[in-house]
Structure formats: C-alpha cells, structure tokens
Amino acid sequence: MLRVFKLARSWTSFRALLNKILDTFDEILTFAILLGIFLIVFMILGLEFFANKVHLDQNGNISDSGLSPPINMDNLQNAFIAVFQNLIGNGWNYAMYPFYRSQGVLAILYFDFSIVVLNIVLLKLFLALLLSKFANPTDRVDQD
C-alpha cells in the first residue's frame, strides 16, 4: 500500500488523476443523498403495495397462510434488501416472481419502474458526474 502512495508522490499525472477524483466528492455526496431519497421512496412504495400480501406454502405455491418468500417487503429491512437488489440488478427477476404471482401486473410495473429509475437513470447520472470533471479540456490530467 505504501508503494502506491510513493508512486502517487512521484508520478505527477497519477497525482493529477487522484486530485480530479477527489474534486468530485462534493458532487458524489449530492448524488448519494439523491440515491438515498429514491431508495426510501421505493422502499415505502414496496411496503405499501406488497407488505404481508405474498405468502408461499411448502411447495412454493401462493397461499394465504404460508411463509413469506426469501426476498419480501414485510418490513423496512427486507424492503431495503429487495430495493437494493433491484438497484444492483442481481436476481431481481427471481425476487419479482412471487410478487407477480400474488399481485399480478402491479409487481411488474413496480419492479420494472424501479429498475429504470434506480439502475439506469441514477447510475448513469453517477457516471456522468464522474466523467464531467475529466471532460474539461483546459484541465489536462497528463501534465508532467
């Protein structure tokens, strides 16, 4: 780890690149607050639409008195896990399937809209924030 810092001290273009990344932290903080707001909104929507409405029996069929699926929206913690799974795009369709079988088209609309807003729009905004500091041609990174 110390070699990296030693390299950063001697390599001016690498130091300039690190300075550009550090300059974007104030914008990234604003983005993190915006992302947190959208996560909370989708958690509350998920709780409103799906809390304690999806239950599975031992065979995996929808029932009124079974257990909740592994990814559920019965409480705030599980809703955060489900929404975060949508955010990163990891197995969101497997999480959506029991909700779809229980609630129908509402689940498809909720999960697809959350993927579009959280994954596509907000993460692309994050990349745009990072790349905006590097797009300015007057501040070249490779000045030695």
Image (cartoon, grey):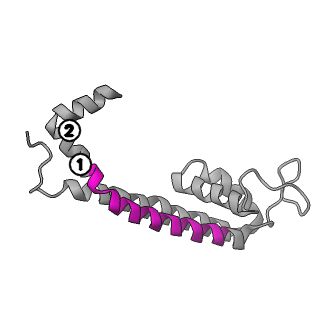
Q: Quadrant of the C terminus?
A: top left
Expressed as whole percent of the image width and height from the top left, the position of residue 91 reads: 60, 48
Q: Is residue 29 magenta?
A: yes
Image quarter (top left, top right, bottom left or bottom right) of the N terminus: top left
Q: In the image, is 108 to the left or to the right of 120?
A: right
Q: Residue at x 20, y 41 (%)?
A: 15
Q: Nearer the viewer, residue 132 or 68?
A: 132
Whole-angstrom CA distance, mark 2 to mark 1, is 9 Å
Q: Earlier in the sequence, mark 2 or mark 1?
A: 2
Residue 11: where, in percent of width, then height? 16, 33
| Residue at the spot of label 2 | 14
Q: At label 1, which amino acid type do we have?
A: Asn
- Residue 16 picture quarter: top left
Other residues around mark 1 within 10 Å, as few (<14) / some (14–19) / many (≥20): few
Residue 99 drawn at (x, y percent): 72, 61
> 77 or 26, which is in the foreground?
26
* Residue stretch in magenta: 21-46
Please name the residue shown 62% across and 53% down the image. Answer: 93
- What residue is drawn where x is 15% and y is 58%? 136
92 falls in the magenta region: no
Q: Is residue 111 above or below residue 93?
A: below
Q: Secondary structure at mark 2?
A: helix
Q: Where 135 falls versus 10 (above or below)?
A: below
Residues 39 and 5: in front is 5
Q: Observer-nearest residue: 111 or 47?
A: 47
Q: Which residue is mark 1?
A: 19
Q: Quadrant of residue 30?
A: bottom left
Image spot of residue 50 (x, y percent): 73, 68
Q: Is residue 142 left or right of residue 130?
A: left
Q: Secondary structure at mark 1?
A: helix
The amino acid pointed to by label 2 is Phe
* Dominant secondary structure, magenta: helix
